[in-house]
Structure formats: structure tokens, C-alpha cells
Amino acid sequence: MNTIWIVLPILTLLMFDLGLALRFEDFAKVFRKPWPIAVALFGQLVLLPAIALGLAYLFRLPPVFFIGLVLIACCPGGSSSNVFSKLAEGDVALSVTLTALSSVITLFTIPIIMTWATRLVGESVGITLPVGNLIKQNLLLMLLPVLLGIGIHYAWPKAAEKIDKALTKLAFPLLLVLITVFYIQHHKTILDNIGVLGLCVTVLILVAIGCSSLLSRLVRSDSRQRRTVVIEVGMQNAAQAIAIASSPFIFASEEMAIPAILYSLMMNIVLLIYVGVVRNKQV
């Protein structure tokens, strides 16, 4: 079974669910909370990919995992980050705003960063990036579902609320199904590389959390905003990264998706621990 036919519908549903929860007014909050948003976007779009690049060199990852690690670092949040922000008693409105902004901005940043990363280590071993196909897939599977969700939200708000509640409950189980199927198919490769690659993605998550918390303190964000920024920077959209890596129209490499799978597992473990800590102690 090709996992792409599982991940594509899951990604589309998750982005549609994100659209159901968005309002155009969310984008206006940029002007009311500029510093927390600026810090979070810097962490998501610049800091995390830069850290991933440095760690990929430090751990001497082979090209396919090198590109895969940078790829997962380029795919922020998704709707799950809003749920984690709520669990952590963070600023949920800020989380929704950041999710909306990063979903739009990464339509442009992912092609730029991944083109550079592929030329840096991939082309010498035959890995190429058809940028046009990447842009088309992102528009089709990410932007269009979000716009459809926003449209339904404004046209039928009560129906949108009910659909959103149902899809929110389905999101995590669907990702677990995807990870399980992926592991069954690629368990040997995952187990062979889990030592170095697992340590690498864990360090990436921990450094991201530490740096985003420090940056939030530097701009004097309150504790609720700080928790949200930490979660938004640390939580990545694994479904998006897997879709790009394994798509037959882009990289066509399920092996490249392994960093995203491992990141997703460690991300949920680390951030659930973080949520538990901040709920019991003000950070």
C-alpha cells in the first residue's frame, strides 16, 4: 500500500478543519499583538529550519534524511497546535492567528527553503525538487481546503461548528493510523536509523522549545502567550511533510518522510510533558 493515498486525504481534512475554525478577523490580530506573533513566526519560519540544518550537519545525516529533517522543520503547526494551546491554558486566539498566518506564509517559504536544501545536498545523489509540482500540490491540498472551510464557516456557522468538533476528534486518531501504516511498511529502515535520527529530532524539538521560550521572554510576553509560542514553534505539521516527501509528483520518497514520522512521535511526547508541567506550575 502506498501511504500517499492515506496521507493526502488526511492532510486535506486537517486543512479543511483549520478553515472551519478561522475568521478573517484573526489576521487583524497581527496589529494588536505584534511582538508575540513576530517572535513565533520567526521561530517557525526561520529559527526551526536553521536549527534543523545545523543538526543535520552535526549528526551527519545522509541526504535523504537531511532533506527530510529540513522539510519537517518547514511545516509549522496545523490545527493540533490550537488543541495543545488550549490544554496548556495558553492564548488560544493567538494560536489560531499564528496557524492561519503560517499556513499562508509557508505556501511561499517551503518551496524556497526546500529548493535550497535540495541543491545543497540532494542533487549530488540524484534528489531533485520539481518546484512547480510542490506549489500546485500545496495550493490544492492546503489552500483550497482552508478557503472551503472558511466559506462554510461564514455561510453555515452552526453546521461548521458541528463539523469542526467531529473532525477535531478524528485528527489525532487519523495521524496515528498514518504513523502505524508507515511504520509497518518501513519498520526496518526506521529501526536501523532510530538511534541517530531519533536523537536528532528530539534535540531539534528541545532546542526549539528552549529558544522560543527565551525569545518570548525577551519581548516580555505574558505566560499564556509564552506557552502558545513554545507550542506553535515546537509542533509541526507531520501530515504536510509526509505528503510532500512521499508524493509521486514531488520527491516520491517515503524514506524521506521518516524524519517527519519520528518528529511527530517525539513532538507529542515532549509537548504533552510540557503541557503537564505548565498546568501544574506557572512558567
Image (cartoon, rainbow, N blue to C red):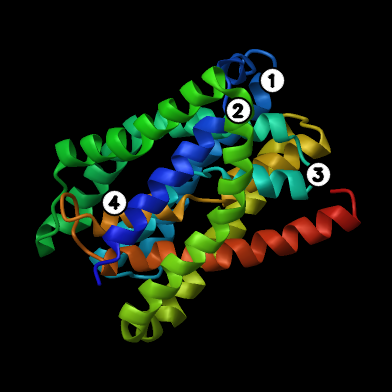
Do the residues under discs 2 and 4 have CB atoms within 8 angstroms?
no
Q: What residue type is labelled 3?
A: Glu
Q: What is the distance, in whole Å, between disc 2 and disc 4 at their CAs?
A: 24 Å
Q: What is the distance, in whole Å, between disc 1 and disc 4 at their CAs?
A: 32 Å
Mark earlier in primary sequence (3, 2): 3
Q: Which amino acid does label 4 sit on?
A: Ile
Q: What is the distance, in whole Å, between disc 3 and disc 4 at their CAs?
A: 32 Å
Do the residues under discs 1 and 3 have CB atoms within 8 angstroms?
no
State the image quarter where residue 4 is shown.
bottom left
Residue toward you, 76 or 54 = 76
Q: What is the distance, in whole Å, between disc 1 and disc 3 at their CAs?
A: 18 Å
Q: Which amino acid does label 2 sit on?
A: Thr
Do the residues under discs 1 and 4 have CB atoms within 8 angstroms?
no
What residue does disc 2 label?
Answer: 97
Q: What residue type is labelled 1?
A: Lys
Which residue lies at the image location 41% right of the left edge and 61% below the top edge? Answer: 260
Mark earlier in primary sequence (1, 3): 1
What residue does disc 3 label?
Answer: 89
Residue 261 showing in the rendered view: yes
Residue toward you, 137 or 164 = 164
Is residue 207 left or right of 191 when viewed as pictured?
Answer: right
Crowding around mark 1 (Cα neighbors within 10 Å: few <14, some 14 to 19, many 20+) is few
Mark earlier in primary sequence (1, 4): 1
What number is the disc on residue 244? 4
